[in-house]
């Protein structure tokens, strides 16, 4: 079937011959010109003097001495006019969002040649409607009904505010336009209006051929009419009988507009053979497909292209995206044998890695600094250092990440991060840098120039990359930042950093990276707007849902719907109508049509397009409906057991020492033990610098207790009530020790004697730790005198056990928080383990429960196991237990120690463990049994049965839970 452009090409050759050097062909968009030229050459079959191809926008701009200004600059200038006439001091930051809305309204007023002062008439005075003779009766009724609503006595605050703004819009409109004219610039609507109203316009070409226009603004009609009267205008409309409003077809707005064109230009229909507007009766194969996800739709593209010769038909085949966010998925789903493919939409800059890199850089400067210090929050530093583009900045980034992670440096200093010149630039203080600083405060210009320098470094170092997308995306990003920097430097853009952040994201979201290639060759992958004036034999419409076809247009405007309707401005009805025209134009000449819609209601209504429903009712063609389903069904993931292969056994055989924590992890989940201790996949550290996880909190408490009790103990280790009173009576002593430990453990500061700069949450944690330390000292004072035998003491022993293939020796143990002598005669040894968490909910009733995995959560069997093991190790120590003193394990739950009669000594079945030796034999047998299980090559590592543990497990993604 002939395409629309083939008909046009054939007709203009017949009418105007082969010399079209004095002819201009005007299109709504640029893409159709490429296809038109190819049609002309093919149909002429001989040399042709090609016409000039221009868009309607170029035609208007060419006949004006004004230029269309940058949208951001327009908002900045509009803000000045708004301030002048509204009498408010509204900041540009607050104004920017709805300034875009007001600019859009002004643009629509001008393109439709409405009188701005009549549109913005004073709504409070109904008598201003007296002089409306230029309106039709229908328009008068619409306006009167609307104005009545503004004359009731109970005006709401919203109405009052609306009216207050409304009465200034006419003056703002005049001042804004005058301001722009004096600068030699305009917004698009104003430029169009000045050209349309200039009767002295001269047009250089002998003829102007307007091809494939649909909904016209009034400025366009005026230009068309002027050229028509001069005998220079020729028109080619693209429609068939379906678009002509008939009584037997549901009223179609697109048909209404075609009728309006023929009303203005009644003699233009006879330029075509009847075939061009009688395509409704042509045989078509139409298929509707219901899909549950966008991903399934993208994957279907490959199968669709491989069938019915669609791929070999090249440019006669189109994959059309109603949702252009699908592009990335479609690109990955194209069959490898596709050969040439033309992608018209461009790749979104927002989806390229450089976009996330810039946003990370922005966050680093705006939120990454710790107060006014030269330190950064670790999470912001790591986001930049772990970004893929850091390889274009420095080869020392990986080394730096390792250093920060290994030494747990949560607030790295600037000089530590500046390992080379590029890193020094990236982590510089732009407030004091001679290169960037413009004022005492952080300025937007400093920020933009700094980011431009970083992106410039990336651009210089990615030259050798074979990935063209990287180079192109970096260039586009530099252009975006440069554009904002120029506006800021000129003083036009004066906003706070939050608004600047929104503007950067807005510009990134609206920027695309064009694909290079031959547009008229290969399968066409395009958005809806790129299909204008083009015809295809094979069409695949993706994501053809209501809300995407028609596109989810909103009616956001300062001008109410009724007034827009009355004055002939663009309404939501017009926007929907034009999408109806696009939809039916796509399928008008196609014979092979497939439309897929997403039936899932998760990200929308899950309904097919209203145009699809309309086609089902009105079309004479048979429509086949199918469902598209994934080739597999989802099933609950069950972690697999891991056998002890030779590789696993090699790692196990190399373990010479094991900690109680590792054995507790094995009891909790054997797979967790495997991932941590065999596969060496370490649990991720908490890098949220504003919070402190339990591990850091516990470390700070333990180290503080060590410093304080080490000071109290002196040389002989004996602690009396006076020793503790010294710390209790002077709170500053404890506070200074806590500050010192915070500096060492959290801030990694060299100045450990000075108080750190805390944030709010850290201050709360500091106060809690101080309270816990004071509570610990108060309880210890009640049992004075007692003697400290050891603080943070290493305690290890060797255990011999069977592994199923021989005997094995291993060292087991760890660090004991505190060993002390208590009692009237200092006759009992206590092994004290501090705990800052919650106390067990239930009691341990037997030794077997200590080794059971079921007792971990509610009975803290893992805590019992650790301190009982330490106690048994001390019973064999010649240094601490040479005289055979009783040894008691104690868990000191600081949070619950204020209870009356609190005793930290462990109890099993309500019987305090007066001496650990009574459980020694049974404990050792259980320990050997679990060690034998860990190191036995015949026993696989199996997952836990308690799925609640999986919810907080750091390895759950590996198990796919």
Image: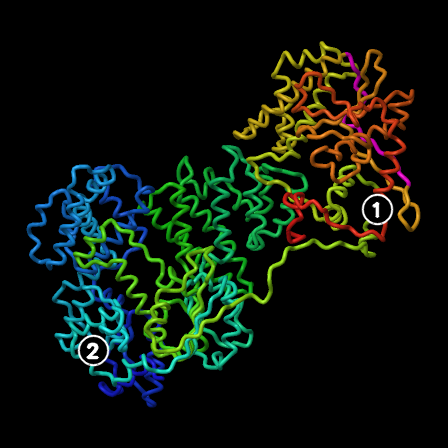
Q: For this view, does 941 lie left or right of residue 515?
A: right
Q: Is residue 5 visible?
A: no
Residue closest to the far right: 806
Residue with the mark numbered 1: 933
Query: Depth-wise, is mark 2 or mark 1 nearer the camera?
Result: 1
List the residue tagged with mark 2: 234
Q: Residue furthest bottom?
A: 46
Query: How many labels were placed on the picture?
Result: 2
Q: In this view of the protein, which residue sits in the foreground, 836 or 179?
A: 836
777 up-or-down from 74: above or below: above
Q: Tell me residue 92's x, y (percent).
A: 31, 42
| Residue drawn 60% across the image and 45% down it | 419
> Left or right: where does residue 259 sit relative to residue 130?
right
Residue at image position (59%, 40%) is 687
Q: Residues within 10 Å of mark 2 (few under 14, many from 20)?
A: some
Q: Is residue 495 above or below residue 191?
A: above
- Comparing 585 with 167, the one in front is 585
Q: Secondary structure at mark 2?
A: strand
Q: Nearer the viewer, residue 14 or 361?
A: 14
- The alpha-carbon separation of the residues under discs 2 and 1 comes to 90 Å
- Write down the region rendered in magenta: 785-800
Q: Earlier in the sequence, mark 2 or mark 1?
A: 2
- Quadrant for the N terminus in the image: bottom left
Q: Position of residue 923 (x, y in %)?
A: 86, 34
Q: Residue at x 88, y 27 (%)?
A: 918
Q: Secondary structure at mark 1?
A: helix
């Amino acid at each position: 079937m002939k395409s629309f452009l083939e008909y046009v090409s054939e007709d203009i050759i017949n009418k105007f011959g082969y010399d079209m050097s004095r002819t201009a062909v005007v299109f709504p968009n640029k893409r159709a010109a490429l296809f038109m030229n190819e049609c002309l050459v093919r149909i002429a079959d001989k040399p042709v003097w090609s016409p000039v191809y221009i868009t309607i926008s170029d035609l208007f701009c060419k006949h004006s001495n004004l230029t269309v200004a940058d949208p951001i600059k327009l908002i900045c200038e509009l803000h000045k006019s708004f301030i002048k006439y509204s009498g408010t001091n509204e900041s540009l930051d607050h104004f920017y969002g709805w300034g875009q809305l007001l600019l859009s309204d002004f643009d629509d007023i001008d393109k439709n040649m409405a009188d701005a002062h009549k549109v913005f008439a004073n709504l409070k005075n109904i008598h201003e409607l007296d002089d409306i003779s230029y309106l039709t009766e229908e328009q008068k009724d619409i306006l009167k009904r609307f104005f009545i609503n503004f004359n009731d006595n109970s005006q709401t605050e919203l109405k009052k505010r609306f009216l207050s703004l409304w009465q200034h819009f006419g003056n703002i409109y005049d001042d804004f336009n005058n301001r722009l004219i004096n600068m030699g610039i305009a917004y698009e609507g104003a430029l169009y209006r000045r050209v349309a109203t200039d009767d002295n316009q001269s047009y250089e070409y002998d003829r102007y051929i307007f091809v494939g226009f649909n909904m016209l603004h009034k400025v366009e009609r005026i230009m068309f009419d002027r050229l028509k009267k001069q005998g220079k205008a020729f028109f080619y409309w693209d429609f068939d009988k379906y678009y002509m409003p008939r009584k037997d077809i549901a009223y179609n707005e697109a048909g209404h507009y075609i009728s309006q064109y023929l009303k203005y230009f009644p003699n233009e229909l006879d330029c075509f053979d009847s075939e061009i507007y009688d395509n409704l009766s042509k045989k078509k194969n139409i298929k509707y497909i219901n899909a549950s996800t966008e991903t399934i739709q993208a994957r279907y593209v490959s199968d669709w292209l491989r069938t019915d010769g669609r791929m070999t038909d090249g440019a006669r085949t189109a994959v059309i995206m109603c949702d252009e966010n699908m592009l990335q998925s479609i690109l990955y789903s194209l069959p490898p044998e596709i050969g040439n493919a033309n992608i018209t939409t461009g790749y979104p800059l927002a989806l390229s890695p450089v976009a996330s890199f810039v946003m990370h850089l922005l966050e680093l400067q705006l939120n990454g600094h710790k107060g006014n210090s030269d330190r950064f929050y670790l999470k912001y530093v790591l986001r930049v250092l772990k970004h893929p583009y850091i390889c274009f900045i420095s080869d020392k980034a990986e080394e730096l990440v390792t250093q920060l992670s290994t030494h747990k440096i949560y607030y790295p200093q600037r000089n530590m991060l500046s390992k080379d010149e590029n890193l020094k630039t990236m982590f510089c203080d732009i407030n004091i840098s001679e290169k960037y600083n413009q004022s005492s405060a952080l300025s937007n210009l400093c920020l933009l120039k700094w980011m431009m320098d970083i992106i410039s470094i990336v651009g210089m170092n990615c030259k050798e990359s074979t990935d063209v997308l990287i180079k192109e995306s970096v260039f586009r990003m530099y252009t975006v930042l440069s554009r904002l920097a120029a506006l800021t430097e000129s003083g036009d853009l004066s906003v706070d950093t939050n608004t600047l952040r929104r503007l950067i994201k807005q510009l990134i979201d609206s920027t695309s990276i064009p694909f290079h290639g031959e547009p008229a060759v290969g399968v066409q992958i395009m958005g809806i707007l790129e299909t204008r004036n083009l015809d295809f034999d094979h069409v695949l419409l993706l994501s053809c849902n209501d809300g995407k076809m028609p596109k989810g247009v909103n009616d956001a405007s300062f001008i109410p719907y009724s007034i827009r309707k009355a004055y002939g401005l663009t309404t939501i009805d017009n926007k929907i109508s034009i999408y109806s025209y696009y939809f039916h134009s796509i399928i008008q000449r196609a014979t092979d049509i497939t439309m897929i819609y997403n039936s899932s209601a998760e990200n929308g209504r899950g309904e097919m397009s209203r145009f699809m429903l309309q086609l089902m009712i009105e079309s004479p063609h048979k429509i086949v409906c199918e469902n598209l389903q994934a080739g597999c069904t989802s099933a609950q993931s069950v972690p697999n057991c891991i056998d002890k292969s030779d590789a696993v056994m090699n790692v196990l055989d190399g373990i010479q020492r094991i900690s109680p924590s590792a054995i507790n992890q094995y009891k909790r989940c054997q797979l967790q033990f495997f991932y941590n201790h065999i596969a060496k996949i370490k649990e991720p550290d908490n890098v949220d610098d504003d919070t402190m996880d339990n591990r850091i909190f516990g470390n700070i408490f333990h180290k503080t207790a060590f410093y304080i009790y080490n000071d109290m103990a002196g040389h002989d280790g004996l602690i009396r009530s006076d020793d503790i009173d010294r710390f209790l009576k002077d709170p500053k002593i404890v506070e200074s020790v806590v500050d010192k430990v915070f500096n060492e453990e959290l801030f990694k500061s060299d100045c450990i004697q000075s108080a750190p700069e805390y944030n709010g949450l850290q201050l709360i944690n500091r106060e809690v730790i101080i309270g816990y330390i004071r509570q610990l000292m108060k309880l210890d004072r009640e049992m004075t005198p007692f003697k400290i035998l050891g603080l943070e003491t290493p305690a290890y022993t060797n255990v011999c056990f069977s592994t199923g293939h021989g005997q094995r020796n291993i060292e087991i143990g760890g660090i004991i928080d505190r060993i002390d002598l208590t009692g009237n005669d200092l006759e009992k040894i206590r092994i004290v383990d501090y705990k800052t968490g919650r106390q067990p909910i239930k009691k341990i009733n037997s030794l077997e429960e200590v080794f059971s995995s079921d007792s971990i959560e509610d009975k803290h069997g893992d805590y019992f196991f650790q301190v009982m093991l330490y106690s048994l190790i001390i019973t064999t120590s010649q240094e601490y237990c040479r005289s055979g003193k009783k040894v008691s394990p104690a868990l000191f739950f600081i949070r619950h120690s204020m209870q009356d009669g609190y005793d930290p000594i462990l109890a099993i079945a309500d019987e305090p463990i007066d001496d650990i030796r009574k459980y020694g034999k049974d404990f050792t047998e259980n320990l050997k049994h679990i060690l034998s299980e860990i190191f036995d090559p015949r026993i696989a590592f199996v997952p836990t049965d308690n799925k609640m543990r999986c919810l907080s497990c750091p390895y759950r993604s590996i198990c796919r839970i």
